[in-house]
Amino acid sequence: MRRTWVVVIGAVVLVLPFLGVDDYYLHLLIMAGLFYLLAAGMNLLLAAGQLNLGHTAFFGIGAYTSGLLAVHYGISPLWTLPTAAVFTGSSTGTISKRTHSRSSPAKGLFGLSAIICWY
C-alpha cells in the first residue's frame, strides 16, 4: 500500500510542470526536494552516529560550478548540470585518491582542511 502512494506522489510531481503550475510553486517544490535529499542523507549519517559534512560540501561544489557556468558564460542549465556533476565527481575522486592510503583520522582532517581552504 505504501509503495502505491509513493508511485502516485512521484507521478503527480513529474506531471506538475506540464499542468501549468505557477513557476513560483514549482520552484518551491524543487527546492523542497533538494533540501529533503540533503536532510535525508544527514539523517542517515547521524542515526549511525557519524558526523560527515562531505556530501553537503560536494553538493555545494556542484551548485557553485553550475551557477558560475550559467552566470559568467551564459550556458543553459541543461548543460551546466551534467558539467557540474562531472566536475564534482572528479574533485571527489581526487580527494578520495589523496586520502585513500592514509589513516581514518587523517582522512577527516584532510577533508576538513580542504573545505576550510575553499571558503
Image (spheres, grey):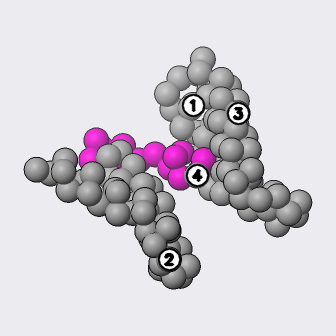
Left or right side of 21 for 73: right
Percent of width and height locating residue 98: 68, 25
Q: How many marks?
A: 4
Asked if residue 7 shows in the view, the reply is yes
Task: Give amino acid for label 4.
Answer: Phe
Q: Badge 3 is on which residue? A: 90
The Cα–Cα distance between marks 4 and 1, rounded to whole angstroms, is 22 Å
The Cα–Cα distance between marks 3 and 4, rounded to whole angstroms, is 13 Å
The Cα–Cα distance between marks 4 and 2, rounded to whole angstroms, is 29 Å
Q: Earlier in the sequence, mark 4 or mark 1?
A: 4
Percent of width and height locating residue 93: 65, 29
Q: Earlier in the sequence, mark 4 or mark 2?
A: 2
Q: Badge 1 is on which residue? A: 106
Q: Earlier in the sequence, mark 3 or mark 1?
A: 3
Q: Nearer the viewer, mark 4 or mark 1?
A: 4
- Secondary structure of residue under mark 4: helix
Q: Residue drawn at (27%, 51%), measured in percent from left and top?
A: 7
Where's the C terminus, which quadrant?
bottom right
Left or right side of 80 for 9: left
Magenta part of the chain: 46-58
Q: Which disc, if any, is residue 20?
A: 2
- Depth check: 19 or 54 in front? 19
- Secondary structure of residue under mark 1: helix
Q: Earlier in the sequence, mark 3 or mark 2?
A: 2
**18 vs 4: above or below:** below
Q: Which disc, if any, is residue 6?
A: none
- Depth check: 75 or 62 in front? 75
Q: Which disc, if any, is residue 59?
A: 4
